[in-house]
Image (cartoon, rainbow, N blue to C red):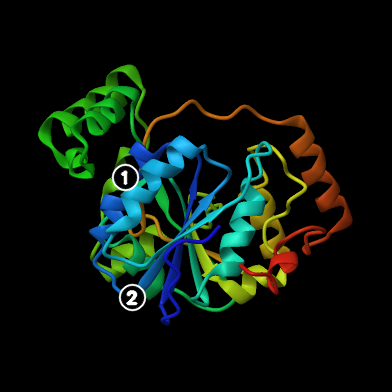
Amino acid sequence: MIMMADTRPFQASLIISFYNKPDILALVLQSVRNQSAESFEILIADDGSSEVSLEKLRKLIRDFPLPVRHIWHEDKGWRKNAILNKAAAAASSDYLIFIDGDCILHRHFVKEHLNHRKPGTVLTGRRVYLSPVATSLIIQSGTFKKIFSFPVVLRLFYDRYLNKSSAHLENALYLGNTFLRKFVNRKDRGVLGSNFSLYRNDLIKINGFDEQYTAPYVGEDTDLEYRLRLAGMRVKTLKHLAIQYHLFHQRQAKNLLNEAIFEKTKSEGRYYAEKGIAQYLDSAY
């Protein structure tokens, strides 16, 4: 299912994973609209949202000022990796930026990913974990800008240092100084599935996301990073550059089946997914 197709060339395709939370996606799209970068398309990778959510989504993107396409498949359980592959296959740009549908973006988020893009390199930013109370205040306000209001900032500091329900507030600091940027990002860090980018051909090289994973945890990022590195890609961190604010939800529990799949991949030393993006490259997507 594809809506509002656009064939113009873009510098990047911003792929947003989504499932049944249109009100939260509305906040994310506000921050996308506020980006300093231009010439990028948006693909909403929808893992089977309900008709009620779809109706809200249609209204949300109907008059959106940027090109939006909605990539949907039927709900047959957790198939996030499959819908991400379908969205990546559908992308009009040769550069892909991946975020989750509950992550609000800093104004220069897309610009920083674009400015540092390089073939054979995966870029990964960091995020601020918002507390339940701060998240509730933002959602109730109906605007992503509430993040920067005094009551929410004060609450985040309270939650961070007194009841420990916020985390990594330091990641909200945006650095403009070139020397500080290089100094802070000299350390190798892991890929975040909600905040990374790479050239489409580099993703195709490893056959995209491995669709053997049918539950969250490991498959969207840890497995992907392992196979990308195995294929010769390097990982570059955009800490204090590509910044996200992650709205609170309960963390996913570890999945033993996913761990077994990942261990098998590592034991085989295999970077090419058995079932991945290749099946969609010549399809209607």
Image height of 272 relative to 84, above or below:
below
Q: Residue at x 73, y 51 (%)?
A: 211
Q: Where the N terminus falls, by quadrant?
A: bottom right
In the picture, measured across the screen, residue 47 lies left or right of residue 138, that is right
Image height of 246 relative to 8, above or below:
above
Mark-to-mark CA distance, 2 and 1: 20 Å
Q: Quadrant of residue 178?
A: bottom left
Can see residue 82? yes
Q: Which residue is mark 2?
A: 39
Using the image as rendered, state which of residue 108 and residue 73 is in the foreground. Answer: 73
Using the image as rendered, state which of residue 78 and residue 245 is in the foreground. Answer: 78
Q: Where the C terminus falls, by quadrant?
A: bottom right
In the picture, measured across the screen, residue 281 lies left or right of residue 91, that is right
> Label 1 amino acid?
Ala
Using the image as rendered, state which of residue 15 and residue 246 is in the foreground. Answer: 15
Can see residue 102? no
What kind of element bears circle 1? helix
Q: Which residue is mark 1?
A: 26
Image height of 118 relative to 54, above or below:
below
Residue that extends furthest to the left in the rendered view of this protein? 150
Q: Are marks 2 and 1 in contact (CB under 8 Å)?
A: no
Q: Quadrant of residue 110?
A: bottom left
